[in-house]
Image (spheres, rainbow, N blue to C red):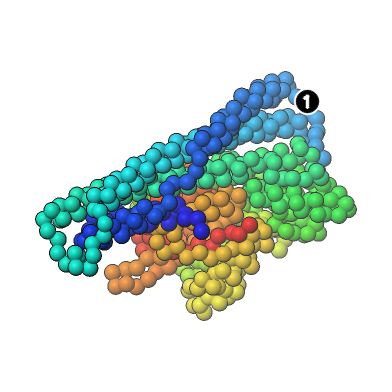
């Protein structure tokens, strides 16, 4: 079985600690052999560099395309309609311009990721080779293993040889460890960036001939009007892919009904939410009822009623920490005066149910409207929303066999509710992974970041222990990723960002408080 970069890193970390402490010649020889048995950093820098340069070469073609689109946009387009679902030509050209810019960013970002990885792997392989040379030199200096009686006594010369060899071996394994860390970090960063750019190639995700290229382009481009457009696109990469497949599966009559709903929509946002409901697995009959409730509503109303989470453009700014270890820079997620908060006010321990409900509402606008708008879909009453929200939290809490006092749910119950409540909307089942040390958390990061880049929320459990050893636990949800930062929804009603290093090394207090520093469980979507 291939040794993972995390395993290689972990084994060498242990050897960096044990080799300098080797108390006998034979122990040192054994440890040197263990170090030499660790596989070197894998990868072909030449191939990676070639791929990176190929990505970069595409920028010239994208640049020419950008100039052509810009030329069209300056001509003063008439108010004509395009596509199957009535899209203004001027809006389509604007969307095309943004898509071309995103394409250029993707090629540039992909090229940068691959070229950086190539350079790092090349340097790491050389550093690893230098370390192995030192280990082999140390091994040669030690000579053959001591016999049973030889090991009883070590004279001054033998001790000098052992200590000198141990010094060289320690230097050698340290070089190998640094190489392993650099290769591991670089591979993880490249995977994160490439997954992100792949997810942001949004228009191509909707693979259906039942909508025109203009329609697909506009749907991929549409964002909510609240918050930063880049962070608040209505259709995720996963939504685009699932809705395209769903369109292909509709009967001709159903497809005609869906296309008419889209054509009648009063805004790009309304149209996008109809497609999002299709992606969530709803029938055309359900979507027609939903369309009747939201038709003609302005984009701010649509956002308020259909999107539990909005992300502000300055949300990534580091504003320091509060006294309890939490980030000062947090966004309250509200419906009017009422937060998307467990128990309505944070008083109940229904964190699993509450984070699950919010994630479901993020992925299913029909469900979100049931909570915010009530049976008619027209309500705008925060207090009524609170009652419905808490009732739903209690339902899901009981579904997962949570405590009678609305306090706590075990991991089996959590697995049950996330798969029952979220999976139908995303098309991915969730698998529990316990991550009780830094290596395990580091290993799971690429899977988390790929999922959230595609638009699939990732449930996590965090915990802490007080001075008496008493445990506190809490459930939250990873809902976004930008660079090396993860966006966390806390069912206390807030979102904030933490770094990868915070996630790996016990810094999750930034998304909660000092009582809950360590991530210990992750439910990962399975494709």
Count of numbered labels shown in the rendering: 1
Q: Report whether 244 appears left or right of 498.
A: right
**Picture residue at 51% right of the left edge, 77% below the top:** 403
Q: Position of residue 434 (x, y in %)?
A: 47, 65
Q: Position of residue 92 (x, y in %)?
A: 72, 33
- The residue where tag 1 is placed is 78
Instruction: Farthest residue to the left: give it.
Output: 156
Mark 1, Cα crowd under 10 Å, few <14 / some 14-19 / many 20+, is few
Q: Nearer the viewer, residue 522 or 285?
A: 522
Q: Report whether 223 appears left or right of 153.
A: right
Q: Nearer the viewer, residue 208 or 382?
A: 208
Which of the 4 image quadrants contains residue 221?
Answer: top right
Q: Is residue 395 above or below residue 104?
A: below
Q: Nearer the viewer, residue 51 or 475?
A: 51
**Picture residue at 59% right of the left edge, 31% below the top:** 54
Q: Position of residue 111 (x, y in %)?
A: 54, 34
Q: Is residue 274 above or below residue 97?
A: below
Q: Position of residue 442 (x, y in %)?
A: 44, 54
**Picture residue at 86% right of the left edge, 49% below the top:** 256
Q: Could one spot residue 226 in this view of the protein? A: no
Which of the 4 image quadrants contains residue 318?
Answer: top left
Q: Nearer the viewer, residue 12 or 319?
A: 12
Instruction: Farthest residue to the bottom: give it.
Output: 404
**Picture residue at 69% right of the left edge, 22% below the top:** 68
Q: Is residue 148 above or below residue 193?
A: below
Q: Report whether 216 appears left or right of 509.
A: right
The quarter of the picture where the C terminus appears is bottom right
Which of the 4 image quadrants contains residue 73?
Answer: top right
As helix, strand or loop, the secondary structure at mark 1 comes to loop
Q: Could one spot residue 165 in this view of the protein? A: yes
Instruction: Farthest residue to the right: give it.
Output: 253
């Amino acid at each position: 079985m291939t040794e993972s970069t995390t395993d290689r890193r972990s084994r060498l970390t242990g050897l960096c600690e044990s080799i300098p402490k080797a108390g006998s010649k034979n122990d040192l020889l054994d440890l040197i052999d263990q170090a030499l048995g660790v596989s070197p950093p894998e990868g072909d820098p030449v191939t990676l560099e070639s791929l990176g340069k190929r990505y970069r070469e595409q920028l010239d073609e994208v640049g020419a395309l950008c100039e052509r689109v810009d030329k069209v946009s300056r001509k003063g387009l008439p108010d004509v309609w395009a596509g199957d679902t009535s899209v203004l030509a001027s809006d389509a050209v604007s969307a095309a311009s943004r898509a071309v810019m995103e394409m250029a960013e993707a090629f540039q970002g992909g090229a940068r990721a691959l070229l950086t990885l190539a350079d790092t792997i090349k340097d790491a392989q050389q550093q690893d080779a230098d370390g192995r040379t030192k280990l082999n030199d140390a091994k040669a200096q030690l000579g053959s293993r001591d016999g049973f009686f030889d090991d009883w006594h070590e004279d001054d010369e033998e001790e000098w040889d052992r200590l000198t060899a141990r010094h060289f071996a320690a230097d050698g394994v340290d070089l190998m460890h640094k190489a392993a860390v650099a290769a591991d970090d670089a591979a993880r960063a490249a995977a994160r960036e490439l997954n992100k750019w792949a997810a942001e190639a949004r228009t191509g995700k909707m693979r259906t001939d039942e909508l025109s290229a203009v329609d697909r382009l506009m749907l991929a481009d549409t964002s909510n009007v609240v918050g930063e457009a880049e962070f608040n696109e209505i259709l995720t990469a996963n939504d685009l892919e699932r809705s395209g497949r769903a369109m292909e599966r509709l009967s001709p009559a159903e497809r005609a009904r869906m296309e008419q709903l889209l054509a009648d929509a009063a805004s790009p946002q309304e149209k996008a939410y109809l497609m999002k409901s299709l992606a969530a697995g709803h029938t055309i009959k359900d979507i027609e009822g939903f369309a009747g409730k939201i038709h003609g509503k302005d984009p701010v109303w649509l956002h308020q009623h259909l999107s539990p989470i909005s992300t502000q453009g300055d949300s990534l700014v580091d504003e320091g920490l509060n006294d309890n270890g939490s980030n000062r820079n947090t966004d309250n997620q509200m419906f009017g005066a009422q937060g998307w908060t467990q128990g309505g006010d944070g008083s109940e321990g229904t964190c699993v149910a509450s984070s699950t409900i919010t994630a479901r509402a993020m992925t299913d606008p029909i469900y979100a409207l049931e909570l915010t708008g009530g049976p008619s879909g027209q309500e705008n009453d925060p207090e009524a929303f609170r009652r419905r929200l808490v009732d739903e939290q209690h339902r899901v809490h009981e579904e997962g066999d949570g405590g009678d006092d609305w306090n706590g749910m075990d991991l089996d119950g959590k697995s049950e509710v996330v798969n029952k409540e979220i999976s139908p909307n995303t098309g991915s089942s969730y698998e529990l992974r316990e991550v009780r040390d830094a290596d395990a958390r580091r290993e799971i990061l690429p899977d988390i970041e790929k999922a959230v880049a595609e638009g699939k929320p990732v449930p996590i459990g965090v915990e802490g222990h007080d001075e008496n050893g008493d445990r506190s636990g809490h459930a939250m949800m990873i809902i976004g990723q930008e660079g090396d930062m993860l966006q966390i929804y806390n069912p206390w009603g807030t979102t904030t960002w933490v770094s990868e290093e915070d996630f790996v090394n016990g810094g999750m207090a930034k998304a909660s408080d000092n009582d809950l520093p360590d991530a210990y469980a992750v439910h990962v979507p399975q494709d």
